[in-house]
Image (cartoon, grey):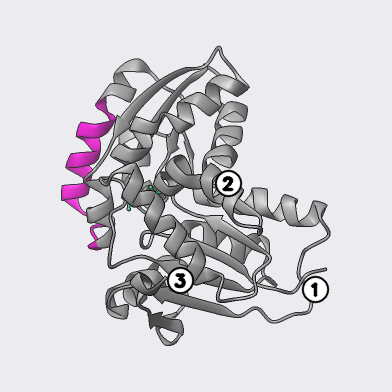
Amino acid sequence: MDNRPIGVFDSGLGGLTAVKELMHQLPQESIIYFGDTGRVPYGTRSNETITKYVFQDIRFLLNFDLKLIIIACGTASSVALEKVQKFFDIPIIGVVEPAVEAAVKKSKRKKVGIIGTQGTIQSRSYENKIREKDPEIITYSQACPLFVPLVENGYIDHEVSRIIAKEYLELFRQQGVDTVIMGCTHYPLLRKIIAEVMGPQVELIDPGAETARYVRDFLARRNQLTDDNRIPQYKYFVSDSTESFSRLGSLFLEKEITNSVEKIDIEKY
Ligand code: DGL
């Protein structure tokens, strides 16, 4: 048993997809979340900058006595996971491996579409992992740089997002993919629209949610789950104003979080 909280971070709101599933799968676990809203997006930046940000985000989270850190960001996981795993002593889990495991299991026709930020698509992280696990799977990749600003600005169920999604996903429709990895943790917030465009027969993989399930098994195996009768504490930190994160985060988590959100200066770390 280990009652210490789990640390989770992302460039903004996207990592809440992992938090939502953690709350569901592991309702007794406490969570410390950091959303780097002052520096979002990560996906258009150089590997060097993303890596610097990821080190700072982890150093901030290490102010708390945590049992595990989840990089709930496709871009940061693709670019910096191995470096930080080597550098820090605490276990660090990214979203790529859990999402790929789910996609490989679910794809029947072995045609998988991957959407992600420019950084993620350029890194080929999902493609390479898929190839390792099942070389017969054919992958198609598409960067969707407009999705993150749409989500961060609350265009969750908006005609503009629908038009852009149709444009981005056309290749997958033409190729008849049966599974789509929403390879950036912001994208499942647009799930309704992506599902509408792809149609009901296509499986959508949510990397944050898959990672939460992976973490449940990881902690259970190591006997590190929190005691069942503990009341969980949730604390959220952001690097820009708390207002829009609190509003959109409360909507997405279906839980009022405004009083638990605090602004910090990430440049100090
Ligand atoms: N949610 C992130 C990801 O999974 C980051 C998006 C961004 O900041 O560009 O890639």
Query: Is 76 or 198 nearer to us in this picture?
Result: 76
Above-or-below relation of 57 to 260:
above
Rendered-image quadrant of the N terminus: bottom right
Residue pictured at 51% horizontal, 51% vertical: 208
Query: Is 9 or 245 nearer to us in this picture?
Result: 9
Mark 3: C-beta under 8 Å from nearest atom of ligand 1: no
Residue on which disc 1 sits: 227
Depth check, mark 3 against mark 1: the one in front is: 1
Residue 238: x and y, percent?
37, 73
Residue on which disc 3 sits: 254
User: What segment carries the magenta color?
Assistant: 153-170
Is any part of residue 137 visible from this angle? Answer: yes
> Is 91 placed left or right of 155 in the picture?
right
Residue pictured at 44% horizontal, 80% vertical: 256
Above-or-below relation of 141 to 208:
above
Q: How crowded is mark 1: few (under 14 residues within 10 Å), some or many (20 or more)?
A: few
Residue on which disc 2 sits: 210
- Across the whole image, how many numbered discs are drawn on residues? 3
- The kind of secondary structure element at disc 2 is helix
Q: Does the magenta stretch include residue 166?
A: yes
Depth check, mark 3 against mark 2: the one in front is: 2
Residue 136: x and y, percent?
55, 12
Among all residues in the image, which is located at the extreme bottom? 259
Above-or-below relation of 10 to 80:
below
Mark 2 or 1 closer to N-term? 2
Residue type at mark 3 is Glu
- Marks 2/1: CA distance? 23 Å
